Structures are given as C-alpha cells and as structure tokens.
Image: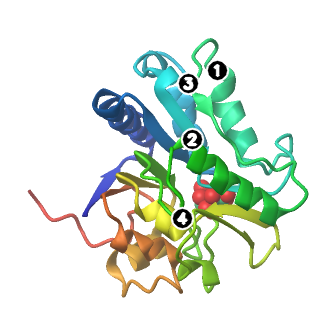
Amino acid sequence: MSVLVERMESRLFNGTVADEMIASLTDAIQERGRASLVLAGGMTPGGVYRQLSIPPRVDDLDWSKVWMYWGDERFVPHSDGRSNFKMVQETLLSQLGERSPKVLPVDTSLSSVEEAAAAYGELICREEKLSPGQLPVFDLVLLGIGEDGHTASLFPGSPLIQRTGGICFSDNHPSDGSQRVTLSVDAILAARRIAYLVKGESKADIVREVLEGAGNVDQYPANIYRRASGQVTWFLDSGAALKLAPERAG
Ligand code: 6PG
C-alpha cells in the first residue's frame, strides 16, 4: 500500500482529478479489458464529473468498458435532489450521449434500505463475477470525507467500521437520520486504487487529523485508508491542505 498526497490550487483540482481517473481507468482497460469505477457522492466530485463529461476528456476514455458503481447512496428516489445517482446523472451521464458505460446504481425503489443494500451486494457479485464470500477488487474507488471524518456512509462510531464479511450494508446518518446504503470497509479497502477528493478550508482540520493524527478509525472512519491493499491518493486543494505540515521539498 502506498499513500500519496497531491496538493494543488483549487482551480486545478477538477481537471487534475479527472485526468488521474482517465489514466487509472485506461490502464485497467488495457490490462484487463474493463474498468470498475466506484463514484463518490456529496458536493465535491460534481466538478470533476463535469470535466469528464466534456471534450477533450470525454473522448479520452472507452466508456463502453467502464462499470460504474456508487460508493454510497441515500435511500431516496433517483429523482430526489439528495440522490447521489441524480448528482452523477446531472454532472456526467446526461452529457455522455452515445457513450455508454455500464451504469449500476443502488436500487432505491426496493421496500427497505436493508433490502437495497443486500440487493446491491448481490448485483456487485454478479457484475464482478465473484464467488460466494469473495470481495470485489474495484479498479478505482472515489471517496469524500465529512468534517466529522466519515467517508462513504461509514459514520463515526458505527458498528460497520469493524464489521467484516460483507460487500454492502445499510446505516442511518447519525444527525439527520437519513437512510443510507454504503460499501463495506472491506469492499473499499480491497480496491486497486482509492482516491479521496477533498476541497475547501472547512475540511482542513479533519484532513490534518486523518493524515497526521493517531489514526483511530472508529473516531474518524476515513482513517480506513491506512489498511488499504492498493494505492491511496489524497487529492487536496489548497484550502483542504491548509493545516498540513509544509510539503517536504524534493
Ligand atoms: C455522501 C457522500 C459522503 C461525502 C462526504 C463529503 O453521500 O454525502 O458519500 O461521504 O463524500 O460527506 O461530502 P462533500 O463533498 O459534500 O463535502
């Protein structure tokens, strides 16, 4: 496992991350004939997804070989403004035209969030051709981080942080109570590459805590990166990196 921290001016963030995504996915397609991408929700990644949806970048990737999953989802209709699927639909999918990735959202029309989580885990097993109990090895998992240190929908103090043996679980947001479906810690950590996308001074404290602090995963679930199997990259704009120790020269 290697951890890279990429700091950059805010104006460069979306394009830099979009370029890195294209490079990772293209490598996967060249090596294995397909690429599995897990998208992050929230507000931060929208600008990155927009950069992917327009020339020149939109023509730099063979979208037909990309399997597109969600790292977490709110248990609301896909038409709901809180839906991570809707955010990706608006910022990326609606612009792809004939380019057709395999789009695999969480089915939030099912009768319960528990059923949706179980069904999503089964869908991932089918699409990734897994044996029972086998974990997916996604080529690239995008994650955000909340100011409380959550990532995906793995929240501080959640029993899901220590839970093993599953691909997808459900939980409730600790403050707003919203029902969530989330990839498991194991499914995230098995990825070939994990990329955290973090922008803004409001995240500077939690970024310093998670990159330079004690590493408690129950307190700050984003600390799970320390147990990742593959490459971990933290993409930070200057605001998010504000309180980190100065970069070592060279
Ligand atoms: C969600 C995300 C969540 C998000 C962080 C950061 O569904 O909200 O999966 O984990 O990545 O909360 O969100 P922002 O990018 O909006 O700060």
Image coordinates of residue 98 in percent, x first then y, are 62, 11
What distance separates the C-alpha of mark 1 from that of mark 4?
27 Å
Write down the residue under mark 2. Answer: 127
Q: Residues within 10 Å of mark 2 (few under 14, many from 20)?
A: few
Q: Residues within 10 Å of mark 4 (few under 14, many from 20)?
A: many
Quadrant holding the N terminus: bottom left
Write down the residue under mark 4. Answer: 145
Q: Are marks 3 and 2 in contact (CB under 8 Å)?
A: no
Write down the residue under mark 1. Answer: 95
What distance separates the C-alpha of mark 4 from that of mark 2?
27 Å
User: Tag 1 or tag 2, which sits nearer the N-term?
Assistant: 1
User: Tag 3 or tag 1, which sits nearer the N-term?
Assistant: 3
> Residue at image x 42%, y 64%?
189
Q: What's under tag 2, amino acid-wise?
A: Glu
Q: Are marks 3 and 4 in contact (CB under 8 Å)?
A: no
The quadrant of the picture showing ligand 1 is: bottom right
Q: What's under tag 3, amino acid-wise?
A: Ser
* Viewer-side residue, 66 vs 43: 66
What distance separates the C-alpha of mark 3 from that of mark 2?
24 Å
